[in-house]
């Protein structure tokens, strides 16, 4: 399945579980000691350029996967959707294993095999017992190197993907974020959907899949990541024997600049009960020094859901206003990063008559970030960001995913104690500076679906992106 922006409910769970984590670490010294004692992430680069990264926790289970630096951003209008199509085809049999053999082999191990596609990455991973890591690596290597790509299987997967597209269209949050990317990055690869248009799904053939593999599945663009009960030296040997024959690439992957355009798209449908709206400005890429302050600013705006108790006593100004004035059903701030750009904004669901009031309160909060955010608010946001950072690394699979993504983005994994220090170093002036740089007087991108007649005109939204005050 294609990877999407995290849902509101998942963020709510992380938010509420933060109290348990704070109770566990009763002092900053205890937390710091814990972070320093987390096993180091070891990284080795093979002769062909493939990187092997792992964290050995000594657990009885492990997650191992292949993180590939290629997603829908690596496609063009003609083959948009091919990366996601390949993800589906990976489990339909290889030169040495039929689909049935593959499924039985994984099931007999008691393992779980999965995959997802995002705009910049394709991932194949397995969760298994530690003793079965060699077999899991061999299966993953077989999948990406020897997929059969049979015509009958391709034809069968077309209908599967078309049904998946129908399911996605019923998830209005995903629809809104696809529209947001389409308008914010119009005319560029990041504006394309991950699944691709229907006409492409109906026409993609074996040659398109093969060309994509030969162009992008190069050793230097692949990371073999593992977490749990896995020995790094053993993993390096497994990588050499199973993935050592992958072709090396002498040239780094080209990054097509994706221009951000302040604009809007509205899909008015008065038959829907609620309005779904996303507003975002252009953020920064993974490696930009402004990323951490923007994450703090994003956490400061926060998230809220009507089912969440204590809204009137919430530390977030926007959450308090939403609860007291019944502005919305839920909202979620987000900071979506790519290699060289990003989207920083908010997604909310509200009654049709509340669209204008909700936008007013959001932009008031954004302007407050730029001009008068306080020391206490920033400290709270920093503590909450650190808490959520740890909560998101609960289990071998999230850790493995963190390793694979960071090696692709930074060419190293940032240790947790270093990340904590970076967050601690963010000051009030840093938050104000990045807010002025990325939010103040900037053209936003707006995507709205549902009964959105009362959503203010784009020019009004744009004119509220700055304050004229004496």
Image (cartoon, rainbow, N blue to C red):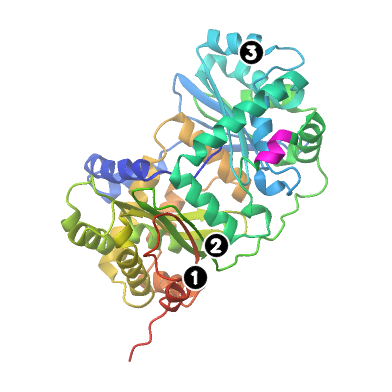
Secondary structure found at label 2: loop
Q: Which residue is mark 3?
A: 102
Foreground: disc 2 or disc 3: 3
Tags 2 and 1 in contact by the CB under 8 Å rule?
A: yes
Side of 132 where 427 appears, left or right: left
Report the span colored magenta.
198-202
Quarter containing the N terminus: top right
Quadrant containing the C terminus is: bottom left
385 sits to left or right of 377: right
- Do tag 1 and tag 3 residues touch (Cβ < 8 Å)? no
Query: Secondary structure beneath disc 3?
Result: helix
- Tell me if residue 165 comes above or below residue 349 in the rendering: above
Which label was assigned to residue 284?
A: 2
- In the image, residue 200 lies in the stretch drawn in magenta: yes
Prevailing SS of the magenta stretch: helix
330 lies above or below 105: below
């Amino acid at each position: 399945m294609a990877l999407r922006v995290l849902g509101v409910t998942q963020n709510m769970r992380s938010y509420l579980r933060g109290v348990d984590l704070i109770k566990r670490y009763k002092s900053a010294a205890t937390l710091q000691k814990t972070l320093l004692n987390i096993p180091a992430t070891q990284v080795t680069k093979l002769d062909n350029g493939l990187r092997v990264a792992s964290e050995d926790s000594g657990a009885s289970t492990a997650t191992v996967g292949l993180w590939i630096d290629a997603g829908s951003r690596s496609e063009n209008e003609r083959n948009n959707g091919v990366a996601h199509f390949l993800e589906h085809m990976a489990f339909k049999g290889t030169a040495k294993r039929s689909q049935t053999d593959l499924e039985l082999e994984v099931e007999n191990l008691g393992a779980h095999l999965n995959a997802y596609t995002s705009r910049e990455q394709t991932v194949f991973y397995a969760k298994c017992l530690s003793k079965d890591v060699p077999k899991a690596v061999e299966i993953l290597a077989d999948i990406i190197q020897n997929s059969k790509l049979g015509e009958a299987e391709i034809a069968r997967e077309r209908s599967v993907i078309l049904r998946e597209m129908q399911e996605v269209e019923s998830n209005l949050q995903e629809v809104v974020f696809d529209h947001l990317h389409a308008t914010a990055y119009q005319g560029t690869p990041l504006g394309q959907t991950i699944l691709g248009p229907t006409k492409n799904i109906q026409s993609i053939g074996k040659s398109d899949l093969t060309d994509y593999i030969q162009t992008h599945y190069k050793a230097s663009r692949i990371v073999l990541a593992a977490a749990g009960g896995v020995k790094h030296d053993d993993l390096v040997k497994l990588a050499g024997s199973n993935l050592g024959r992958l072709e090396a690439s002498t040239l780094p992957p080209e990054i097509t600049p994706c221009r951000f355009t302040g604009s809007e798209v509205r899909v008015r449908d008065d038959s829907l009960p609620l309005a779904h709206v996303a507003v975002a400005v252009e953020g920064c890429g993974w490696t930009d020094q402004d990323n951490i302050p923007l994450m703090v600013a994003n956490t400061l705006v926060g998230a809220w859901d009507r089912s969440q108790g204590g809204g009137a006593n919430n530390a977030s100004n926007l959450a308090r206003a939403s609860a007291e004035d019944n502005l919305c059903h839920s909202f979620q701030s987000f900071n979506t990063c790519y290699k060289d750009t990003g989207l920083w904004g908010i997604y909310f669901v509200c009654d049709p008559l509340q669209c204008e009031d909700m936008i007013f309160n959001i932009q008031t909060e954004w302007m407050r970030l730029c001009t008068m955010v306080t020391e206490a608010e920033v400290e709270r946001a920093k503590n909450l960001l650190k808490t959520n950072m740890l909560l998101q690394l609960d289990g071998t699979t999230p850790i493995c995913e963190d390793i694979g993504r960071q090696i692709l983005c930074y060419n190293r994994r940032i240790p947790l104690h270093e990340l904590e220090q970076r967050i601690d170093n963010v000051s009030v002036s840093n938050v104000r500076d990045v807010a002025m740089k990325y939010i103040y007087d900037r053209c936003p991108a707006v995507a709205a679906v549902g009964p959105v007649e009362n959503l203010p005109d784009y020019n009004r939204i744009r004119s509220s992106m700055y304050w004229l005050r004496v």
